[in-house]
Amino acid sequence: MSKSEAITLQTFTQGLWKENPVFVMMLGLCPVLAVTNTAMNSLAMGVATTFVLVCSGFLVSLLRHVIPKQVRIASYIIIIATFVTMADYLIQAISLDLYQALGAFIQLIVVNCIILGRAEAYASKNGPLKAVVNGAGMGLGFTFALLCLGVVREVLGSGSLFGLQVMPDAFQPWSIFVLPPGAFFVLAFWLMLFAWIEERKRKGGKAA
Amino acid sequence: MSDADAMEIPPQPSALRLIATLGGIAVMSGLLVVSTVQLTAPRIAENRRVALERAVFSVLPGAVRRESYRVDETGVVQTEANANLYAGYDESGALIGYALEGAARGYQDVVRLLYGFDPETETVIGMTVLQSTETPGLGDKIIHDEAFHENFRLLDVSRPVEVVKAGEKTEPWQIDGISGATVSSQAVGEAIRRGAEQREAVLTFHRADRADPIDPTDRTEEGGTQ
Amino acid sequence: MKMKFGVPPSGGFSEDASATSTVSHARKASRDLKAPGGSRLKAELRSVFRGSFSHGIHPAENKQFTAGKAIRRLPFPERLVLPLSMHAGKPSVPLVRKGQEVVRGEPIARADGFVSVPLHAPASGVISEIRLMPTARGPRTLSLILDVYAGDPQEVGYGAPADVGALSPDEIVTAVQNTGLVGLGGAAFPTHVKMKVPEGSQIDTILINGCECEPFLTTDHRLMLEQAADLVEGTRILMRAMGAKRGIIATEDNKLDAVDAIRKVLKPNDTVSAMAVETKYPQGAEKMLIKSVLNREVPGGTFPSAVGVGVFNVATTAQMGQLMPMQRGVIERVVTVTGPGVQRPGNFMVPIGTPIRWLLETCGFSGSARHLIMGGPMMGGTVSSLDVPITKGCGGLLVLSEHQLTTEAQMRRYPCISCAACVKACPMHLNPCELGRLAYKGQYETMAESYHLNDCFECGSCSYVCPAAIPLVQYFRIAKSSNREKAAKAS
Amino acid sequence: MSEPAVQLKTSPHLRDAHPVDKIMRHVVYALMPICLFSIYQFGLSVLALIICCTLVCVGTEDLFCRLNHRPSTAGDWSAVITGILLALILPPSFPLWMAAVASFVSIAVGKLFFGGLGFNVFNPALVGRAFAQAAFTVPITTWTPAMVQVRFKEFIPSTFTFPFASPPDLRPWMDGLPIDGFTGATPLALMKFDHIDTEAAELFVGTVAGSAGETSSLLILLCGCYLAFRKMLNWKIVASVLGSAALFSLVFWLKSPELYPTPLFTLTSGGLMLGAVFMATDMVSSPVTPLGIVLYGVLIGVVTVMIRLFGGLNEGVMYAILLANAATPLLNDLTQPRIYGATRKPRRKEAKA
Amino acid sequence: MNPGSAPAIFLDAFLINNFVLAMFLGICPFLGVSGKVKTAGNMGMAVTFVMIVSSLCAFGINKLLVRYDLEFLRLICFIAVIASAVQLVEMTIKKFSPALFRALGIFLPLITTNCAILGLALFQTAREYSLVQSIAFSLGAGAGFSLALLLMAGLREKLDLADLPGVARGAALTLILAGMLSLAFMGFAGLGG
C-alpha cells in the first residue's frame, strides 16, 4: 500500500453509507439506542463522537511511528479517553441540560468500538490528513445513523423535532418510541429498510 | 487480529522505551485534559449556578438571591459545596423560604425534586422535578402538569402529606394525584413526606437564626412573610 | 407416490364402514371384546392396577374383525416363493437345485454361519426356479420358487421325536437354529442368537410377549387361546436354555381370555405364569413390556439381557414348543388378514412363501383398496407388489380402505405448534417436538448427540398423535439413516 | 381382478389427532361466550373492538402472506384467535385506530416476523397489548364502568377517535352517565391504591370494570373446562399458574391481611384468569416438557403476584406471560425429560465450536 | 423499600432498569454472543465477575481521586483500571482454575471494551454509592446482563429452527427480540417502590 495515496472522495464517503458504522458494521450501538430519544441528543452525541474520532485519529496517525506495537492499544485508549474527557467538559460548558440528558453516555464514548476500531485499523496505518478525513466521514455516518433514530423517535414519540412541535395538537404521541423498547424497534426497522434497499439495488444491478 | 500482529514482531523494544512512550502519551493527555478543564471551569461553574438558581427561584416564588447550606443529622451549616438546602430572599432581602431536595422511588426510577418550604407557615410553596424517568405522557405529568403543581402552591406539611385521587382533595395537607399516574404522584408525596426530619432541622435552625441578633447578613425583622 | 382420488367406490369398505369410519364406534366395539368373562367396567377397573409403562397411546383397536375367528387352514397355493433372506443376518445357502423335488419339511437351505437360519420346504413339490423376486423388504432377493404338487397329502416327512429335556443349553440353541426359528413377531431375528446368553449376564426371567399392541392383528391372541400348551412348553425350553428361574407370559388386558386359557394348562405353583398388562400401544415393545411387567428399565444401547430378561414373542415360543420335540423346521405361520378392504377377514395358518395375492384373493379382496400393509398399521410397511410372499416375520396383512386414505390425505400439514402431544406419547420419553424441528432443518447430528435420536425405536406414536400431521417418525428414520451413512463414510 | 395401484407409505398408517385448524376453531368457539358476555357488559364499543381487531389481524396475516408469495395462512383460525384475544384484553373504551395498530403489531411483529404460526416465540396478542401499553399509555389505562345503561345505544366517545389523534377525555361522559354507584376503576387498582376490596361474587361473575373480556372468572373457567375436556388445552399450565399465584399471595395475605388481598381476590381479579386459561396455554409459546410446563406456570403465577403486590403496576399478567414466553426455550432446554433407560439425566451437549 | 438500600439497588439494576434492556449497556456482546445458550452463560458469568472486581477497583480509585481533587482524570483512570483488572482476572483464573479459564477464556479480553463495565463504574460514581451499594449494584447489573443474555440466547436458538422471512435474518431479528424482552421487562417498573 503506497502511503502517498491521494485522499479521495471515497475516503470520506466510505463511512457514510457503504461502511456505515451503525447500519453496516453494527458498532457502537449502545449510544445509538440510549441517547436517541430526541433529535437534539442524537445530534449532540454524534458531534461529540465525531470530535473524538477526528481528534484521536489525527493524534494516533501522527504518533503511529512512535508508538511501539506492544503498547499501542493502551496508548490509543489513553488518547481516546483524553479527548472524551475534553468533550465531556466542553459539553458541560456549552449546556448543562444537554449534559444531563446524555448522562454517562458521553464518557462511554471511550468504549465505543468505532473509535478504537478506526484508530487500530485506519489511523495507525495512514497519514494524519487521511485519518482526519476518514474519521470525519465515519463520524458523520454515525451522526447520520443517530439522527435517523432520533428523528423518528422524537417525532413519533413526542410529536416534536429538536424540541419544536411538528405534529398537530391532536396528535397522540406513541410514547413507546421514547421508551427503551422503541429504540430497539426503530433500529431494527432502519436495518430492515436498508437491507431491503441494498437488496433492491443488487437485484437492479443484476438485471441491468 | 492483535494476536497475529503480536506474533510477527521479532525485535522486542526495550521496556524503557515502552514505558517512556506510555509516559509521554500520559503527560500529553494530562496536559490536554488539564487545559480543557481550566478553560471550561468558569463556564461550567456559571452554568451550574444558573441552573441551580433557576430551580431554587422557581420553587420560592419571588426570590432573587439565595444562600446555600447543608442540612444533615448534625444540623445546618452554611456551605457552598455539597449544599442541599437553599435559603431564598426577595429583592428587599426578606426570607421567602427554604428550598429542599427530596427523593423517592418512582415508577421507573428515583424521582428527585426540589421544593420550597416556608418555615413560618410550615407549608410547601413550590415544587420542581429535578430528575425523573417516569412514563412519557403519564407519569411525567409530575413535571409539567399545571393542576398537579397547583397542589404545591400552598401545601400544609405540618402533618404527613397524603396523596388522594384527582379531584378529591379536601384538606390542606392533601395532594390531588394525577389520574392514571398514581405511582408517580405517590412518589412526589413520599419525597415530601420523607423530608419531615430535614424540615424539622431547618425549622430549628430558622428559629435560632431568627433569634440570633449577631447575624452578619443585613436582614431586617420586618421582612417576614406574615 | 402421489395419487389422485376420485369418488370412493361404494364397494369394498361399505359393509364394514360402520365399524371403521368412526373411531369411537370402533373403539367401543373393541372394548366389548376386551373382557369376555366380565363387564367392561370391571375390566377397566382392573386395568387401573395393571402394570404399565408411562406415556404411549391408545389407538382404536379394531381387533373385532378377527378376534373371534379361530385359526383356519387354507388349501395350498399352486406356487410358493421362498426368499433366502427372510430373517435378519446372512441369507441361507440353498441345498437344492432347480428342478429338484422336495418333501414338506425337508431342509432346502442351510444356515450360513451363526447369525443365520436354515429354510425348510413348506410343501411337497418341485423347485421350479431359483431367481430374484421382489420382497416386502424392498430390494429383489434370491428366492426359491416351489411349485406345489396338487393333490399331495402334504404330510410332514422330516423330523424325529427327541427328548428336549435331555439336551444341554448349548444343544438346545443348536437345535433351535436347526428349526429355522426367527422372531415371528416381525423382527425376524434368528431366535437361537437371542437365546445365547451374553457373557457376564444372568437371565432370571423369560418374558413371553403376547401383547400384540398393534391394532387389527389377532394372531398372537388366537395362538394363546388355541396353542396354550405349546406356548408353555416353548417357555420351559427357553427357561432351560437360558437358565431362567421363571417364565412370564404377558398379554394386554383386552385379551383376558387368553390369560385364562394359559392358566388352564399351567401346573399348580408353576414357574411359568400368565398375566395381563394395560392395553396400550406400544406395550408390545420389548423395553416397554419389561418396564410394565418387571418395572426394570433396559439401559440405552443395551439388550434386555442386561437386566436379566429374555423376551420372546408368543408365536415364536409356541412354534418352538411345537417343533422342538419333533425336531422339525418352521414351515407355516398364522397370519391375520384383516381390514376394511377385505371381505372375509380371519386368522389363517398359511405355508411360508404364500404370495399375498393368492391370500388376498382367497379372503375376498375387492381390488379397489390401494393401501396394503404387511404387519400392523403402526409399524408395518406398505407392500409394493402383490407378488410378495408371506415370510416368517409377517403376522398380518392389513388392507385399509379408500376412505381412510382420503381422510389421511385431507389432513393438512402445519408447522409444529409445540402442543407437546408427541412428548406425552413417546414411550421412550424422548422429545419428538424438538427432534422434529431439528429434523426439519436437517440438523441430524444434533438430534443424535443431544436429543437421543438413536433411542427412538420408531413406534410411530408421535406421528399418530401429531395435530399438525408432521411425519415425525418418518423424519427420524431419514435422520438415522443419514447419520449411519455419514458414520460409515467416516470410518 | 384388476391390478390395484398400490400406494407406498411408511408407517404409521393411522393417525388420530385433532388437526391444528380444528383445535384453533374450537378455541374460537370457547371464546365466543366470553365475547358475548363482554358485549353484554360493555355494549357496542366492545363489539366494534372485537370486529376491528379480528379483521385487522386476519387481514394482516393475509396481506403479508401475499407479499411473500406464500399461500395464505389466514384460514387456520390462529389469527382470529389473536384478534379476539387482543380485543378482550383491551379496555372497552380503547380507540379503534389504536386497536388496529395493536392488531397489526400482534400479527406482523409478534408472529409473521418470526415465520408465522408455530415459530412465534411470544404470544402475539400479548405482543400487541404490550406494544399498546407502551405506546398509548393513557388510553390503555382508561377504564369505563360496566353495565352502563346506554351501552347498547351509544358508543363510548373514544371508540371512534380520528386515526392518530388522541382520544377525548372520558370524564365528562362518565360524569354525565345516568347512573351512579358504578366506578370506572378496576378492582385491582382499587385494591392497590385505595385498599378497597371488591365483592368476591362480583369478581367471579364479572360485573366490574376492566378489560373487555377479563372480568368474568366464572365464564372463563367454564370455557376453559370445555377446551380442557376436549383435550385442546393443557390444564396443567392453568393449574400451575393459578395454583402458584394463589399460594404466593396466600403467604403475604397470612402475613398481613389488611395490606394484601386474599388469594381468592388474586385469582378472580384482573386478567389472571383469562391469561392463565387462554394465553399462558398458547401451545406455540409454552414449553413442551412435563417439568418445563409446570415451571412455566409457576413463573407466570409468581411474577404476576410479584408485580401486583410490589410493582408500580396494578396488573402484571401480561408481562408475566411475556417473560415466561421468553424463558420457554430455556425451560425446554433445562428440563429435557429423562429418557427411558437413561442412566443419568441427559446433559446439554457442548456447543459446537 | 428504601431506594438507597442494597436490595433495592440490586433489584433496580437486575430487573427494573436492566443494564441491557433499559440502559443499553453492553449491547455489543448482547447482540454478538447470544447465539448459543452455553456461550451466553459463560459470557454472563465472566461479565458478572469482572463487574464485581472493577466495581471495587473503581470505588477505591474514585476515593483517591476525590481526595486529591483529580476528578477530571476519572475516566482515564477507570478505563486503565478496568483494562488491567481484566488482565489480572484473566491471569488469576488461568492460574487457579484452568477449567473456568477454558470456559471464559476468549470472552475475557472482549470485556475490556464492554461498555457495561465502564458504565457500571461511571454510574456508581455519579450516584455516589457506598461500598455496599456498589457491590449490590454490580451484582444486580451482572445478574441482569446474564439474564438478558440467556433469555436472548434461548430465543435465538429456538428461532434457528424457524422459517424466518428474509427481512428477519441477522441483526434485525436480534433487535426485535431485544425490543420484545425490553417490553416484557417494563412490567418490573416500580418494583419494590
Image (cartoon, helix red, strand yellow):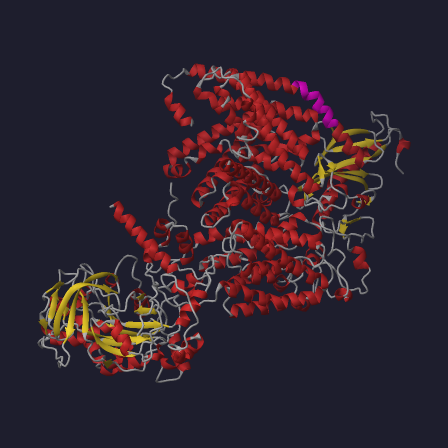
Q: Is D266 rendered above or below residue E168?
A: below
Is B48 colored magenta in this rendering?
yes
Observer-nearest of A202 and D73 = A202
The image position of residue E44, as x and y in percent, is 48, 41
What secondary structure predominates along the stretch shown in magenta?
Answer: helix
Write down the quadrant of residue B95 in the picture: top right
Quarter of the image for residue A103 reads top right
Q: In the rendered image, is residue B204 in sight?
A: yes
List the single residue furthest toward the right.
Answer: B222
Would residue D303 be counted in the magenta stretch? no
Image side of residue D272 versus residue B71, left or right? left
Q: Above or below — where is B146 with respect to B2? A: below
Q: Which is nearer the eye, A145 or B209?
A: A145
Number of marks present in the image shown: 0
* Residue D31 in picture, x, y percent from top left: 60, 65
- Vertical comparison of D90 with C223: above or below: above
Q: Is residue D134 above or below residue D12?
A: above
Q: Quadrant of residue D316?
A: bottom right
On the picture, is C196 further left or further right than E188? left
Q: Which residues are magenta?
A: B38-49
Q: Position of residue B24 (x, y in %)?
A: 51, 15
Foreground of the two, B47 or E160 = E160
Can the viewer see residue E69 in this picture? no
- List x then y, in percent, for residue B28: 56, 16
Task: Tell me the residue at 55%/61% (across/down).
Answer: D77
